[in-house]
Image: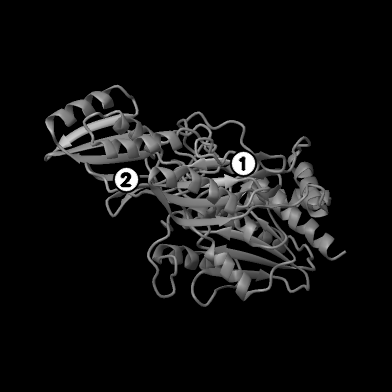
Amino acid sequence: MNQDLKARVSTWLQQHRGDIVRDIFTLSRIPSVKGAPAPGAPFGKACRDALDEAVALCGRRGFDAAVNRDGSYALMHYGDGEKSIGIFGHLDVVPEGNDWRLTEPFEPIEREDCLIGRGVSDNKGGVVAGLYAIMALRELGVPLKSRLTLFLGTDEETGMDDVQLFAKEEKMPDFSLVPDVEYPVCHGEKGIFKVYAVCDQKSEALLSFEGGVAINVVCDEARATLREEPALAAELATLCAASKWMEYRVDGGIITVIAKGIAAHASTPDGSRNATHELAKTLAACTKLPESDRKAMEKLVAVLGDSYGEAIGIAATDEQSGRLTCANGIAQMRDGRVAVSFDVRYCVSLDGEQVLRGFEACFKPDGWHLEDVTYSNGYHIPKEDERVQLLMRVYREVSGDTEAQPYTMGGGTYARRLKNAVPYGPEPKIEKRPDFMPPHHGGAHQPDEMLDLPTYLKGIEIFAMALAELDAMLNA
């Protein structure tokens, strides 16, 4: 590795620290949650606003970027070599969710070397990391033989239709990095299976049953409403009082029962607490509910009781990708019927059809059916691959973390929709959260989403050096 270049990149990034923070904040103030499609804005106006701002940002930094014909994504190119390296980031974010304590979701702040706000990490920080890594190489006069392409997407969180359109419209890069994870190298992603289980029978007593902010975020608040009846109200009040996770209120003849939980990304549900499960437990224990409603709640209590699909009958593990996870994000009623979502991250050795058969066997005999089934099988690149090894070497040499190993994960990134791509950075793993960060806050998809600035700047340095090394490998 060119140690002189490494030192110059590090110095350059420190000199541009203020610009980097301002650019992340500019993007993070835009509430780019997917919305209703509109002309030129297939994923909603806010996502298009974020895309336009990112294109303008590239322009302010001396690059030309252009939005594709339907407004799904934009591309920024640097260089004109025959070989190409892609950098794929996204500007859309998950909904803000509940219980933000340190700032409002779309009013990002800096506190003790931490940036806090929805999207600062996932993935507007990743977009800015890609941009500044390219800028550093340009400003420091590093000769590159490859063409670098920065992809600015707007539909990563909900379907990846943007990158699938890119695959149809554009030539695939020779190799791509996706700055949407922790370092070192993610060389495989589990399959992703999403489904709604819907009770066949309409609810007799429940006026509403709802919760969650997104299918890929563990539900952290769920509520049900019922018409007030003295015996029912008394029993529910007693049941709610017995649990610290439950709240109860009556207003205007309507009973509202609220369950609290702990949010987490659906791919990493350990430590979370599912609010739909808490709500179902309380309702299932209520003897004054009609038997059909209690039976539906009992089913939910059973299938939502673990995070690994054991109760559903889909539990699995393999050597390449580890244990299957299964999380609930949304609770709702569909035409008077209780419905709940599941987000399953399944082993790379499995196929989505196998997961589907498991869900059918679990739900159909008990009077439930499945709706909105989608799945995408995982992928795995051997850790011995020369590109994986190159990226590991760069990470170890720049970070000093010589013990780090490539890993696989349950999270899904653009890499699964591309050819010859791996998720890489831009953040080294943070071993300890700052003291001011509340428990279960600060992570991607959690309240008070956080980006640790010193490790992030080191991450951009790693990324820039990786681009230079990949360029040399591809053009050897």
- Give the residue displayed 30% in from the left and 48% down from the top: 201
Regarding mark 1 in the picture, which secondary structure is present there?
helix
At label 2, the amino acid type is Glu
On the rendered structure, is 194 left or right of 203?
Answer: right
Q: Position of residue 437 (x, y in %)?
A: 47, 33
Give me the C-alpha separation between circle 1 and circle 2: 40 Å
On the rendered structure, is 403 left or right of 133?
Answer: right
On the rendered structure, is 2 left or right of 369?
Answer: right
- Give the residue displayed 35% in from the left and 39% down from the top: 221
Marker count (numbered)? 2
User: Which circle's residue, 1 or 2, is located before the other in the chain?
Assistant: 2
**Mark toward the viewer: 1 or 2:** 2
- Residue reaching furthest bottom? 69
Rate crowding at label 2 as few (under 14), some (14 to 19) or many (20 or more) other CA atoms within 10 Å.
Answer: many
Closer-to-camera residue (131/301): 301
Vertical relation: 171 (above or below) 212: below
Asked which quadrant contains residue 452, the reply is top right
- Residue reaching furthest right? 476
- Residue reaching furthest top? 242
Q: Position of residue 31 (x, y in %)?
A: 41, 56
Closer-to-camera residue (455/136): 455
- Is the C terminus in the top left, top right, bottom left or bottom right quadrant? bottom right
Q: Is residue 387 visible?
A: yes
Q: Position of residue 469 (x, y in %)?
A: 80, 56
Q: Is residue 128 visible?
A: no
For label 1, the residue is 454
Rate crowding at label 1 as few (under 14), some (14 to 19) or many (20 or more) other CA atoms within 10 Å.
Answer: some
At label 1, the amino acid type is Pro
For label 2, the residue is 210
- Give the residue displayed 21% in from the left and 41% down from the top: 205
Q: Position of residue 211 (x, y in %)?
A: 35, 44
Vertical relation: 143 (above or below) 238: below
